Amino acid sequence: MKKIDSISEMQKISEELRASGKTIAFVPTMGFLHEGHLELMREGKRRTDILIASIFINPIQFGFSEDLDAYPRDMEGDFKKAKNAGTDFIFIPSVKEMYPKTFQTTINLKSITNHLCGLSRPGHFDGVAIVIAKLFNITRPHIAIFGQKDFQQLAIIRCMVKDLNLDIEIIGHQTVREDDGLAMSSRNSYLNSKEQISALCLKKSLDLSIAMVNGGVTETLKIKSAIEKLISTHSFVEIDYITICDPETMEDINIIEGEALLALAVYIGKTRLIDNCLLNA
Amino acid sequence: MKKIDSISEMQKISEELRASGKTIAFVPTMGFLHEGHLELMREGKRRTDILIASIFINPIQFGFSEDLDAYPRDMEGDFKKAKNAGTDFIFIPSVKEMYPKTFQTTINLKSITNHLCGLSRPGHFDGVAIVIAKLFNITRPHIAIFGQKDFQQLAIIRCMVKDLNLDIEIIGHQTVREDDGLAMSSRNSYLNSKEQISALCLKKSLDLSIAMVNGGVTETLKIKSAIEKLISTHSFVEIDYITICDPETMEDINIIEGEALLALAVYIGKTRLIDNCLLNA
């Protein structure tokens, strides 16, 4: 595995790989890699000749009061894990090179960002869109793989790729979970042992909703009430949002007909966690 | 010369050309081609193996009260001219394919658009940025050529290419003029014979300013006053702006030290025309 920290060097390597007929998979990360990231990498490696991963904690997707400084880091551990998962090139640019002083371009997706985490975290998805557009242009992949845990992020990237006519196949990979059901996330490292138990309310809410829909309930208000009740039995939990919406447009729905996305965001103590699943009525 | 109206077909051709080692030049236009466009095409053909040009009247770069519907068109004439100028592929997508109903992505450059035409034409450069980003991703050029007449547009595209890490060399080509000095523009076709004479105030203003700077004048206020006076002797002319600014940031300057951009926008009757030149003190 080769470590690359220069944009121009990474771009040159990607172009040469493409010119020689190699296919490239790309997995962008903010590091502190867990099994969720590694599954994306293995999936990329299975599908293409060359796997490029990136580690870049993107400052502009964090809000002022968010956890940029505290965001967990383990570069040496990440290198070992990425290498074992089949990464050929790990791209680790500096903030200074990604965002020089003259940097001023923003990318905004006006409808799809106006829901769910886009409301709780203003500007977050603009930061995601610009960094992913930059990373795509630097690594020039044929496919890029994202976790379905960040469902709205995945929908935004799919839409941006379509709107900008980027010739990249976007693959959503199913959420990888701990044995107890908690969706893997770098932010899980913030939880103490009591909070870890409370955090299970997320997966329990998904399971409850699936059971209700399978049992014939289609009114989203009923499902959301049941989730609220379930969550209220857990300590340290504050609900940010419980939303059942169209999986493409992210617009709220009242009655589930066909496929719907259930998306949850909660604070467990000070830690904000998200989870989601598809519901099929 | 091959005519292509499908995005996917154009993208496939460009990728195959690149994969076979060919270099590509790209010249985007809104059609009604004149010698200014054709010079950009010839320059592109001189520099690369393959020349792709596009004709697309981009609706989202026109304001509500602007001349979208009246914008001059001559597709058959354009095809002949583009072919003679060395164009290998002419890309002519539909508005529907470029902007399907679900389209929602915007690209904004916050500092550089906040000057000159960006103030007179709100949203104009967002429309330019998104269509150029799309066309670049569809035609995948190594170089792209733009006229210096649209100096701010050129600066914005250079900045966007740098910010998004697009691996494309942007070339600015000097303004092509009629024998009488009028900068070539598709909008010149709106002028009647009296207005054509008034329109010469633009080039005369540039010449006057260069003469003043060569004569030692560096205070931009003095130069702008002299231009106002000169323009006031022409009929049917209303000044939109007279600006002397930094050629990269587009920020106003008071005293010229080194290189400065003089940019003018005037209405000749109902027709808005622009022109510019560099001043060197």
Image: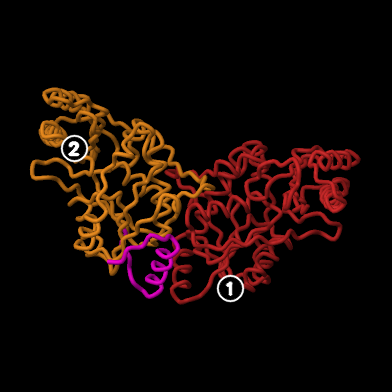
Chain colours: A orange, B red
Q: Residue at x 71, y 54 (%)?
A: B149
* A10 drawn magenta: yes
Report the amino acid beneath label 1: Thr
Report the amino acid beneath label 2: Ala
Compare residues A117 and B216 and report the one nearer the observer: B216
> A112 above or below B48?
above
Compare residues A120 and A112 and report the one nearer the observer: A120
* A205 drawn magenta: no
The residue identified by callout 2 is A281
The residue identified by callout 1 is B48
Residue B228 image position (x, y, % from top left): 84, 39
Q: Is residue B119 left or right of residue A91?
A: right
Label 1: how many Cα within 10 Å (few below 14, some 14–19, many 20+):
some
Magenta-drawn segment: A1-26
Residue A172 image position (x, y, % from top left): 26, 51
Q: Residue at x 68, y 52 (%)?
A: B150
> B86 above or below A120?
below
Q: Nearer the viewer, mark 1 or mark 2?
A: 1
Farthest left residue in view: A179
Q: Quadrant of residue A118?
A: top left
Q: Is residue A137 visible?
A: yes
Residue A180 image position (x, y, % from top left): 8, 41
